[in-house]
Image (cartoon, coloured by chain):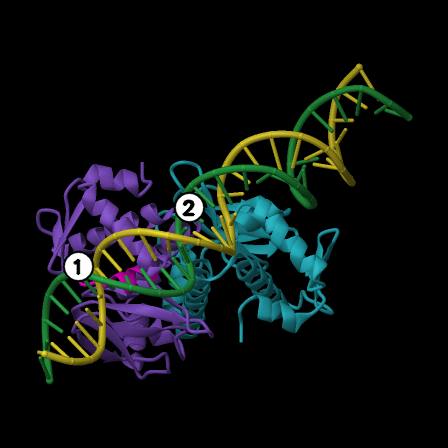
Chain colours: A cyan, B purple, C yellow, D green
Amino acid sequence: MRGEATEDTFVVCEGWACRVARLSDGRRQVLSFLLPGDLFSAVSAFQQSMAFHVEAITEVRYGSIKNAELRSKVAGDPHLLDSFMKMCIAENNAAYQRLADLGQRSAEEKIASLILQLMERLGARGMVHNLTFEFPLRQLQIADAVGLTPVHVNRVMNMLRLSGLIDIQKGSLTILDLSRLQRAAGLK
Amino acid sequence: MRGEATEDTFVVCEGWACRVARLSDGRRQVLSFLLPGDLFSAVSAFQQSMAFHVEAITEVRYGSIKNAELRSKVAGDPHLLDSFMKMCIAENNAAYQRLADLGQRSAEEKIASLILQLMERLGARGMVHNLTFEFPLRQLQIADAVGLTPVHVNRVMNMLRLSGLIDIQKGSLTILDLSRLQRAAGLK
DNA sequence: CGCAAGGTTGAAGCGCATCAATGTAAGTGG
DNA sequence: CCACTTACATTGATGCGCTTCAACCTTGCG
């Protein structure tokens, strides 16, 4: 789905997608990953067109609501307005955290913290069990999200695997040593 | 000003400030620059505490409004709600553009596009004349904004100056060759 | 004057990019 | 069922962009 003006606001019901910005020369930046429950953009009801577009990562089921309807609902219900603003805040804070990650962290830290952020968001949706969760990302998509080459993403992820921090099997990721992974992410 | 819960939402009236995130080991990331007319955070009225803090760059004059008052005003006026959401969108889109800059661009592109973005925002405020505008940033602040070392920022900015793209005199920046600067920024 | 903050410059090294080749698994058509 | 293709993961060799460390310079100011 490209970034044209839309009549509707969409919400992911099932599957993964991502917001992508494309530079004029073709370079791609994955701005954020969309998990079940996420709006394609928390504020899309209020803007003409998006500066990015949305791409499916897996098969995606999604729902929609007319922008005009969403706007009037939000305007008419202070409690809903508050929830809506909180989603907007979350979107902002997530972007700011990624900014700090991209600006300040090494390759290993970037990838480790991306994994931890995804786990946190999936955990809030009850989609993590025993530190294991679905992980449908290709290494190219990870590379475009953290600003590295796919080749280097491969090397770093292999290192994380060989060091016994994570394990990946058939689209499923398991964190084998959470505290070491957090240290590798530069946290604490 | 740290990121504690605040009773008020602040708006910059005069001067420059910036939002800053700090990593646990002390690394800093400048998330965005605040120019006259910017809210410290477009959504600060709706959240408990900020994930970042705000630092002054120059002397800053600012105003404030009680969060509760701002919330009720926004909730009570659909037109104001729309304006408010548009500020939130702008904040988001700016963050996304910086994400793409940090993830995909070279040092020269990062710095050139930062300069162009600042000029664009200042121009919208009528603060640019003959491609010249106030530029109070230290090289360290630029470095923390684009994710480079101050040393390298210095080299790149010197190159931009020696190449005749920009000129800096006493806190004032002039763009000498706009189209070459845009090309250096990787645009078009 | 003497100090502090910031700008400038050089030398050396590392982290990641780049280029290129090979491996591997799933899908497709004959 | 096998030849072929396509997509993605893996691995090695080489090089560059940026970091790091360190010195020195400039400016403003008590």
Where residue C12 appears, as percent x and y from the top left, is: 44, 54
Q: Quadrant of residue D13?
A: top right
Up the image or down, A40 lies above or below B30; here it is: above
Residue, x 25% and y 75% (percent of image)? B10
Up the image or down, A162 lies above or below B8; here it is: above
Read off the chain for label 2: A
* Residue under numbered circle 2: A6
Q: Do we see residue A137 in this rendering?
A: no
Residue, x 33% and y 83% (percent of image)? B6
Label 1 Cα crowd, 10 Å radius (few <14 / some 14-19 / many 20+): some
Magenta-tinted stretch? B135-143
Q: CA distance from mark 1 to mark 2?
A: 39 Å
Q: Quadrant of residue B96?
A: bottom left
Three-letter code, disc 2: Thr
Looking at the picture, tell me which residue is in the foreground, C6 or B134: C6
Where residue A103 appears, as percent x and y from the top left, is: 42, 59
- Could you say whether the residue bearing mark 2 is in a helix, strand or loop? loop
- Could you say whether the residue bearing mark 1 is in a helix, strand or loop? loop
Residue, x 23% and y 45% (percent of image)? B160
Where residue A168 appears, as percent x and y from the top left, is: 72, 56
Looking at the picture, tell me which residue is in the foreground, A112 or A52: A112
Q: Is residue A163 in the magenta section?
A: no
Looking at the picture, tell me which residue is in the foreground, B169 or B120: B169
Up the image or down, C1 lies above or below B117; here it is: below
Where residue B181 appears, as percent x and y from the top left, is: 24, 42
Up the image or down, B92 lies above or below B188; here it is: below
* Residue under numbered circle 1: B135
